[in-house]
Image (cartoon, grey):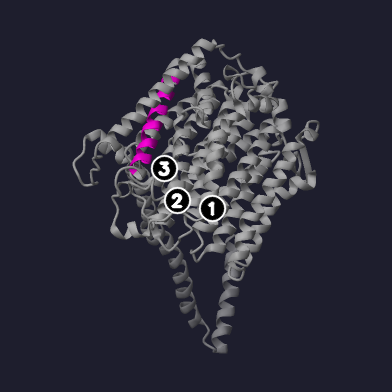
Amino acid sequence: MTLLITLIPLFPLLGFLVLGLGFRSVPKKLTSLIGPGTILLSFILSLIIFFNFRQFAGSPVQHLFSWLRIGPLDIPFAFLIDPLSLLMLLVVTGVGFLIHLYSVGYMKDDPGYNRFFAYMNLFVFFMLLLVLGANYLIMFIGWEGVGLCSYLLIGFWFKNQAFNNAAKKAFIMNRIGDLGFLLGMFLLFTTFDSLSFDRVFTLAKSMPVGNPVIVAITMLLFIGAIGKSAQIPLYTWLPDAMAGPTPVSALIHAATMVTAGVYMIARSNILYVLAPATMAVIGITGLATALFAASIAIFQNDIKKILAYSTISQLGYMFVGLSVGAFTGAMFHLTTHAFFKALLFLGAGSVIHALGGEQDIRNMGGLRTRLPKTYWTFLIGTIAIAGIPPLSGFFSKDEILLHLFGHSFPMWLLAVIGSLMTAFYMFRLLYLTFFRNFRGTEDQIHHLHESPPVMTTPLIILAALAALGGLLNIPEIFNGGSWLSVFLAPVFADAASLAAPPVTISPGAEWLLMAVTLTGVIVMVFWAWTRFVKRQPELLPDSAKRPFLVNLLSKKYYIDELYDHIIVKPILWLSRFFHEVVEIRFIDRFVNGVGNMVVWTGNTVRYIQTGNVGFYMFMMILGVILILFLNILI
């Protein structure tokens, strides 16, 4: 079994090496097999491990070799196989394979085809390293690796400077968060003399709730999660990440990179339960992000950016769930979100592919008859993310909302408002894209066509997963067995024993809460229908006069402009000041002055070398007299 576990991340790494080293010589057909094939092999191995995971119950940590041993620092290269890592393995490799398969059709005419799959394979390798690592250092390697690959993939079309800027923005903002993660690891090691999960969590259990050191550690780790999972204030990189090819958006936003922060906190559940102050900060940050991003998405017109802000909002929900101890609920929503958000992004890619690169939903419309497979699968994804039963998003969102109601009514109410906004902007997107008349150009009408089977097959599979994914954790109120809760219970057992017992909610109250939320969602769906389908939608151009609130939301609260004025421009001014004043006028002048002084001294002193022996004798005698005179004085 240890060999099989090692092969899971090794296959994508081998794919990267083959395609990366031979990207100019490997035939496209072979790339089409190697790229998705390596991820498929990893998924098959993950399934084998999943069905035999009980073998690891006694020894979940698989030591591969001794890695770092310096003084008290002893870090083995080891993988952790438990229910949480298995769930992430299946999500990363399963959804990752479907995205790779879709990419075969989407990227077939791109000149960087081989390079694209090399980067994608490397991305999956680092993500698997992140979720398999048995200590924080291996997790951090994967954490940094996916950051690097996101930079490469966002800026994949590097001849466009705007795309390069988006890649740099993602890289820099992630480094800000990663600094917090790194400092958290330093503090972990100084506190526990280890970075291994088993030792850190075992020692942490004996520490009191609210210990300042634990609070500091969890806060620093959460800063890392803020950067990676695009929470306020480090979220602005993610909408700009749409510069990359659409499969990249699906891979980053659905199953891999942005969910790393949620996974890290769920993995560190014992530490966070011991830090109520940090949990409160996570709750406030997650709730603010969920509402903030959802409100921005309502008035966006770029099909991919709407989904990007939707991702930020849904990640906020996951963090809110984590903040109230709903670790299983957060992981459940992470899983269902991977299904329907990957489906929505790939569906958007199918639309963009059919329209020859058009991404503005104001120039779409009437596509449901021209792209039937894309429409029906996109509809399923929209219903799932809106939280309408019996699709998966309903069950995962409801579990988080139920925990929120038991924890804090205001938090529950704000989260419900966020859900209503989600339903509105997603159905707005659906209606403007697929209903009424086509608003594009004549050339686009002639170009319209359904995507090939290699692209629509992943859409159909993801639609099935988005529809049926709720079966993973059907609650007792629906006579379900809450399978995922039972499966993940061993991972969160210690945290559950340390946390306060959850508030019990009667079945009648639970039915009422679901009815209230569902009623609000249905109202939003019909309001969007009335607004964008029943009557001709008013699609104001960017230059038209709009109400202040509409303009504020469409301009994303001017946060990018604010960051540009208070952070970017001052830093650029400071860098120019140091270059033009400090470096050129002082440092360069000093260094050049030293050089000029040496040259001047050499040019002056060389005249002493006259070649006259009498002069040399005179100087020697003068030197002796000077030495004697100095000795007398001293």
Question: Which one is in front, 66 or 460?
Answer: 460
Q: Amino acid at mark 1?
A: Tyr
Q: Which residue is mark 3?
A: 236
Answer yes or no: do the residues labelled 2 and 1 have beta carbons within 8 Å?
yes
Q: Is residue 278 visible?
A: no
The region drawn magenta spans: 412-432
Which residue in the rendered view is the most extreme toward the front?
369
| In the image, residue 433 above or below residue 19 | above
Tell me which residue sits at (76%, 47%) in the image: 4
Place of residue 538 in the rendered image (x, y in percent of width and height, measured from the top left): 23, 40
Alpha-carbon span between mark 1 and mark 3: 27 Å
Q: Mark 3: which secondary structure? A: loop
- Residue 32 horizontal/vertical position (percent): 60, 60
Tag 1: Cα neighbours inside 10 Å, few (<14), some, or many (≥20)?
A: many
Earlier sequence position, callout 2 versus callout 1: 1
Horizontally, is 231 left or right of 81 in the view? left
Which of 114 and 590 lies nearest the eye of the viewer? Answer: 114
**On the image, numbered disc 2 is attached to which residue?**
349
- The residue at which mark 1 appears reads as 102
